[in-house]
Amino acid sequence: MNFWQRITGGGRKAAAAAGNDGLTDILVRILGGGARSKSGAMITRENALRVSAVLACARVISEGVAQVPFKVMRTGRSPVSVYPTRSDAEDHPLFDLLYRQPNDWQTSFEFRETMVLHALFAGSAYVYKNRVSVGSRGPQIAELILLDPSRVTVTPNEDWSLTYKVRGRNGEPQPIPQADIWHIRGPSWDGVLGMDVLNLAREAIGLSLAAEESQATLHDKGVRPSGVYTVEGSLSPDEHRKLKAWIEREGAGAQNAGSVMLLDRSAKFQSLAMTGVDAQHLETRRFQIEEVCRFFRVMPIMAGYSDKTATYASAEQMFLAHVVHCLMPWYERIQQSAEVHLLTREERRAGYYIKLVEAGLLRGAMKDTAEYLGRLTQGGTMARNEARAKLDLNPLAGLDEPLTPTNMTTDPTGAPSTGDTTGAQP
């Protein structure tokens, strides 16, 4: 029985088929445990994701990481400059794994999306590096396989190494060498495991759940009008039961809101209504969106929340702040982790590195893309055929050389020229 059969009970392919049920099932599979918040709501990863702000934050971070190109790059010596060249290392075995297909059943987008969800909600993401021997080159990483973080146990050893054990479907933990695990940590206190965000944000998420549940109950069971219904004399248990059933049938529910209640037997109704405005339900729910976003370090506007003071200009700056302060730390975290766990020291010394190309965030913003590429080509930073390549357009003859602005040329002596020819020597 091979490794995957031991830890899954059905082989790697079977484990993959069982785990490829879309974003919702992926989230549900990593759920587990929970604690009761002071609001009374039990917080698990499963019901936390039912809070729209939590799901929105999870998606905006995971999709923000997944949507940009993920490449193995290489620096080299330039024949025309002291600065090194930078190019896609398409001949590297990891290039296709990271850029397009890390395993048989996932695309790079799906893989990274799930990986970040694991790191967000479980504190850590674990990737098994499946190696195969390739001729004289020895074992090479042939595929990258995400492990369910709820089945992985990490133990620090006295020599500062880590022991990884994966619990199979039969409940027996199987050890995996540290060298075969790519461990991506979220924000960590001990440097071994990422912090449990759901535990830290338990009260904020719990209050969001409680506010949503109370608002739903108000619409489901709220009597219009609600209050105390009194009649003269006493009611028998059967009469009480029938009266209660009549009130719930004729007066309860959103469909009966505002209807007229007809009373007999000198009955009186004393209204004790408290509206949603009185209870400040709307304000509470709005504040909880901001509170949840703080824990995930997501700008509220990215979670679909915006106050009335926001303008187009301010929203644009908020989108930029989201990239700089939320996504870029995740990019750097994943890039450095990938380089340490997937590249050897020799490869790093040879100029190989791994890059999440944030310029991919400009896809779809044609005006911004045109302005970005236009400035780079007009200033001579980028050749026009390089710009066409970024737009997936074929190169054109004569566009390989970068433009040189007239005010940035140099004279034969090497001194910069301002473009002013006044007083020039013949």
Image (cartoon, rainbow, N blue to C red):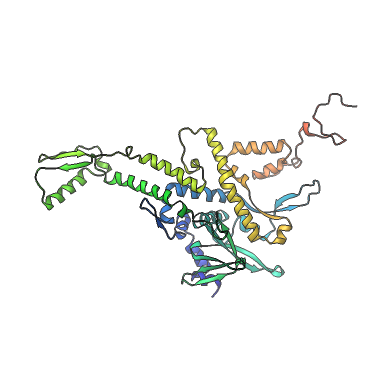
Q: Residue at x 48, y 72 (%)?
A: 172
Measuring from the top left, give residue 352's x and y in whole percent. 70, 56
Residue 79 placement, left or right of 317: right
Q: Position of residue 351 (x, y in %)?
A: 73, 55
Up/down of 194 relative to 174, above or below? above
Which quadrant: the C terminus? top right
Farthest top residue in view: 422
Going by the picture, which residue comes out furthest to the front?
158
- Number of numbered discs overlaid on the protein picture: 0
Q: Is residue 360 left or right of residue 284?
A: right
Task: Write the residue at 39% across / 43% down.
Answer: 285
Q: x%, y% of residue 369?
A: 62, 39
- In front of the other: 157 or 28: 157
Q: Quadrant of residue 353?
A: bottom right
Where's residue 220, x and y in %?
A: 29, 46
At 82% from the left and 34% from the top, the residue drawn is 416
321 is higher (above) or lower (below) than 406: below
Quarter of the view holding residue 191: bottom right
Q: Going by the image, does 402 lie left or right of 298?
A: right
Where does the N terminus fall, quadrant-wise? bottom right
The one nearer the camera, 174 or 426, is: 174
Quarter of the image holding residue 337? bottom right
